[in-house]
Image: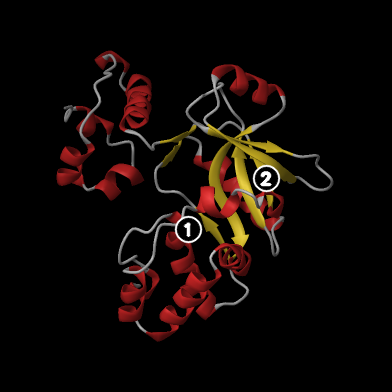
Amino acid sequence: PPQNLIVQPANRGTGYGILLPLLHILRRDRHARVVLLPSDHYVEDERALTAAVTDAFAHTASGITLLGVTPEVADCELGYVLPGARSRGVCAPVARFIEKPGRAVAEDLLRQGALWNSFILVAAVSTIVELISAVRPAEAAAMAAAVETSASSVDHLYAQLDCLDFSRDVVTGNEHRLNVLGVRPCGWTDLGTPERLDECLSRLQARDMPSHGSSRSVFSLAEVSGRCGVTGVMRNVRVQTELMGATA
C-alpha cells in the first residue's frame, strides 16, 4: 500500500532514515515492534536468520536486540560486537563495538566470542525513537511535528537537517541500551562495497556454475542498475549470470 512506502526527501544519514518511518509507525501503533534490515546484505541460509529474528522478537519486549552473526573467518572489513556476561535467556548485553579491526585484533576478538555486527535490529519502536531523541532532541521533535502535519512540512525540515549516522552518532556511547543475540553461521555478508559484492557473486557462481570457472572482475553497479534496477540487484543476488556478463 502507498501509505507503507516512506521515502526520505533527501539523504540525511541513517539516523534520520530510521527515525522518519518509525514516527509514521508510532502514529498507527504506539506499542509496535519492528525489525530493521539493512538492504546491502546477502544471507545464504535465510532460514537460520529468520529463526534468529523470531527468537529476538520473543526476547524483546521494550528494548533493542541486535543480531550478531557467528564469524566464519577473522574478516578485517566487518564490524564486530563483543557480548558481555550473559545473565539470563539467550541474549547478552553489548559490551562494545569494534569497527574493522586489524587481523591480529580480529583473531583475538574471535577467541573472546565476538560476533559480526549485522546491524539487524529487533526493537520496540518507541525505544529507538527515544534513543534518537536523546541525541538530537530538537530535530526529533521537529520531525515528529512535521510527520503529524504534512509531507511538505517534512520536505521543508529535511532541507535544514544535517547528517545523523545511527551507528556512529546514536548507538556509540549507548551500547548499554542494547542486547545481542547470536546467529549461527548462515553465509551472511555485507555487500557495502563493489569488491565485496563481486566476491559474493563469484562465490555463488563457483558453487552454482563450476564449469564456467570464476571471475574476479569488479563490475559497474551503475551499468547493471540501468538494466535490472539497483533494488533488483540487492534483493536477489542470484542474478549473477546476468551481472557477471556486465563487467566493467
- Amino acid type of the residue tagged 1 in the rendering: Gly
Numbered mark located on residue 180 in the image: 2
Q: Rate crowding at label 1 as few (under 14), some (14 to 19) or many (20 or more) other CA atoms within 10 Å.
A: many
Position in image of residue 127 (x %, y %): 63, 65
Residue 232 image point, x, y percent:
28, 47
> N-terminal of the two: label 2 or label 1?
1
As displayed, is residue 15 above or below residue 30? above
Q: Position of residue 235 (x, y in %)?
A: 35, 46
227 vs 73, left or right, is: left
Quadrant in which the C terminus is drawn = top left
Tell me the residue that label 1 is attached to.
15
Q: Residue at x 72, y 55 (%)?
A: 59
Task: Name the image quarter holding residue 80.
Answer: top right
Distance from label 2 to label 1 (Cα)?
Answer: 20 Å
Q: What type is the residue that disc 2 sits on?
A: Val
- Image: 188 above or below 4: above
Q: Quadrant of residue 220?
A: top left
